[in-house]
Every structure is written in structure tokens, then in C-alpha cells.
Image: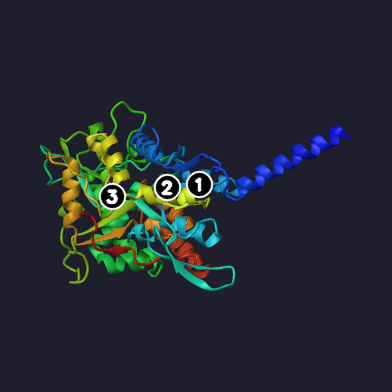
Amino acid sequence: MRRRRCLRTLLAGVLLAVATAGCGGGPPEERTLVVLGPWTDGEERPFVEALKSIGEQTGHRYVYKGTRSLRETLVAQLQAGAPPDVAILNSPGELAEYARAGDLRPLPEHVAGAAVTPWAPTVTVQDAGGEARTRAYWAPIRVDLKSLVWSRSEVADSAPVWCVGLGSGATSGWPGTDWIEDLMLQRRGSAKYEEWATGRMPWQDTRPVWEEWARMLTAGGRAPDARWLHDFALIGDRRHGLLNRGDCTHEHQGSFIRRHYGDDVRPRPTADYLDRLPTAKDDEGDENAFEVSGDMAAVFRSSAAAWDLLDRLTSEKARASWAAAALPGERPFFPGSAVVTAEPSATRDVQRLFRSAGRICFDASDAMPPTLRDAFYRAVLEFVVRPGDEALLDRLLGQLEAERQLQSEEKAFVLDDLCGTPVLE
């Protein structure tokens, strides 16, 4: 009997402790927050330092997990019911898919202001009651400028030999889609670009820019090269960066490519290398328009600590910490915030072009539904092998158009407002 009384007393004490903790009478349970992101191979170091700085302020522990197969990793984690607290992705089309599936949480009011367009357009999602609600679901924490051509100052611009490298693991092909997108933006203007990127234009209407890209790649009798399918940054080679390969003079790439070069390689707008078409209309092109990309943070496991982390990642304090930990050629750009760079450098050149842009439009393939985006990647990989084959181009455009129509029937195009005015101070 005495043993039973002792046991009842012990159980009562345990229940009391649990009840006290649940009612706020004790300290909250500390839990490690997991952040899944795209940076690996040392590129993640400045961001990890910024996370460490945030942890010193909050007392929370943050663990960063980087992967080049971000979509595959995240889908597997969602299927297993073990998503990260926060994931950082560069595809609004993919993020919108997660929002519609109920995997994402909309931004609460106190962080909704971080949803800067065109990086974070609103998404219309039906709630449990069938009511359509339009809200923001993610916020950009780092941005990049595209529509850039990189070369060394001593290289003549009159007859560029274009560097081509389309390999990028599971996302191979995107450097080629960047070319098609940029030519669409420069040749057709931001309104038509947005119409195409959001599924309201047939793919056959893009044929002229595919043909123009083919002429640029094969100028001077240049033949397709198997190395065009190699990695876009020559990862694994001692000399990173395609311009260091020695067989090309100009590279079409976003501002993140700075990390592979010194300050002898500088950027200029793509438009500087394109002739004005005599058939262009007044409202097409000539907008001083640039493509942009970005890394957006979204909460997959809702908690006060996760929302606090997203809020802090978009703060000036975290941005300063991130920039301070980065090498000069890796200093990130942020929407609505300047990277202070006094000395002449590629970073300063990009900053100047960002500020002077008349129009910015988010990367079209990243804004498309994932299945269409992936089909676009595969199409450019096939196209560069035989860029002069008209029958091949007919087939590829037909496949892309069939996928566009399928996605339209499934109402998978849910993004709009992909273009806007610059927001870099």
C-alpha cells in the first residue's frame, strides 16, 4: 500500500510539472530550427555566419542544410512529414505550388511587409472553406541581377565568342533558358515578357528569339561543342568560371558569377550586345529592362521562432552581418538595401546597373509551374546540340506549348506582376 501511495504521489508530481510547463509556468522547450537552402561548396559560409549572429541575439540554435537538389530534397521531406522550419528557394512557381498544396503558411501581418515585388508576388489559394484568398507566402532575402554580359576589359566587344555551359546537376539547362528569357525581354518588352511567363502567350511566338540565340552561338562558323553541356561554372576544375577556359570571350550570366572571377572581369547590359531590330515596335524593348532572380525564404513549420527568424533574415542587421562575412566578390544584394562598396569593382558595377534599371522582371522559367520549367530546361539542352535544325525547334516548341495548355487547364499559372520598378537603394 505504501508503494502505491508513493507511486501516486510521483505521478501527480509529473502531471503537475507537465501542466505547469503547458500553461507557461516554465521556460519554453528549446528546439533547433532547420533551414534548408541552395548554397553549398563554401557559398553558404556567409549565410551561416549571419545565422550564427541571429542565434546569439535570440538564444535559438539554427542549423543550415544545403543541397543542389533542393526540390527533390524538400519534396521527400514533405512526403515524410518532416519538412524544414524554413526553406530558401529561388522559384516562385515552385513556392506557389507548395502554397496551393497547403504546405506553406501565409506571412503574418508583422512580416508581410518583407514580401517585396517582383520577388514575392501574391498567390491566390482556396482555403478549407473553398474561399479564394490572395496573400503573400514568402519574402526575398537575397537578390541578383541578370541580363548581364561579362568579359575582360582588354577583350574586343565587336565579335564576341560566347561562353556556353548548361550543366547544373538536377537543374541543368537554366543558363540556356536565361538566354531565351533575356532575348524575349529585350526584343518584346516587359509586357509581352510577362504575358509569356504567366502562360498567356503560345510558345510558337518565342521562335524568333530561339533563332536569334542560335545565330549568336554559331556566329563566325562556330559549331556546337560538347563542352556546352558541361557545368556552367566548371565546378571541380581548378579554374572556376567559363571565361577562364580560354576558348570564349563573353559570358551571359547573373551577378552571382562574380565569385568565380577577379575584378578584371566586369559586367555590361545584354542590350549593349544586341542590334536594334528594324521591325521592333515602340512599346517593345528599349526599356532598359533587366531580368532578376532571388532567394526567397518561406516557413514550412509554423512557429513563433520560425516567423521571428524570417523577420530577422530580412532585417538590416542580418543583412549587414551577411555582407560583412562575405568576400568582396560574393557580397549579396538585397531588395531595398544597398551593399556599401566604395572601391571600383564588379559588385559596384552591378549595384549601379541595378539602380539605373528602368524595369526589372523576375526570371520567367523560375516563375512557371515546375513541370513547364523543367520541360523548358530539357528543351534548351536538346536545342544547343543542333541549333540550326528547324524541325527540331518545331518539335520542341510544340512540346512546350502542349505543356503550357495542360498547365492552363489545371490552373497552375497563379502568379502575376512579375515585372516592376527597381527597389535597390
Q: Nearer the viewer, mark 2 or mark 1?
A: 2
What is the secondary structure assignment of the residue under circle 2?
Answer: helix
Rounded to the nearest angstrom, the CA distance separating label 2 from label 3 is 17 Å
Q: Is residue 260 above or below residue 288?
A: above
**Crowding at label 1, few (<14), some or many (≥20) Cα neighbours within 10 Å?**
many
- The kind of residue on which mark 1 rests is Asp
- Using the rendered image of the protein, determine whether residue 294 is visible from the camera's viewpoint: yes
Please say whether residue 386 is visible from this viewpoint. Answer: no
Judged from the image, the secondary structure of the residue bearing numbered disc 3 is: loop
| x, y percent for residue 361 | 29, 60
- The reply to whether callout 2 and callout 1 are in contact (CB within 8 Å) is yes
Residue 85 badge: 1
Q: Earlier in the sequence, mark 2 or mark 3?
A: 2
Q: Residue at x 10, y 37 (%)?
A: 154
Q: Position of residue 308 (x, y in %)?
A: 43, 50
Q: Quadrant of residue 328?
A: top left
Q: Label 2: which residue?
A: 309
The three-letter amino acid code for the residue at tag 3 is: Phe
x, y percentage for residue 374? Answer: 45, 52
Which quadrant of the view contains residue 111? bottom left
Q: Secondary structure at mark 1?
A: loop
Q: Which residue is mark 3?
A: 334
Q: Callout 3: 10 Å neighbours few (<14), some, many (20+)?
A: many
**In this view of the protein, which residue sits in the foreground, 38 or 165?**
38
Judge left or right: residue 69 versus residue 50.
right
Neighbour tally class for label 2: few under 14, some 14-19, many 20 plus, Cα within 10 Å: many
Marks 2/1: CA–CA distance:
10 Å
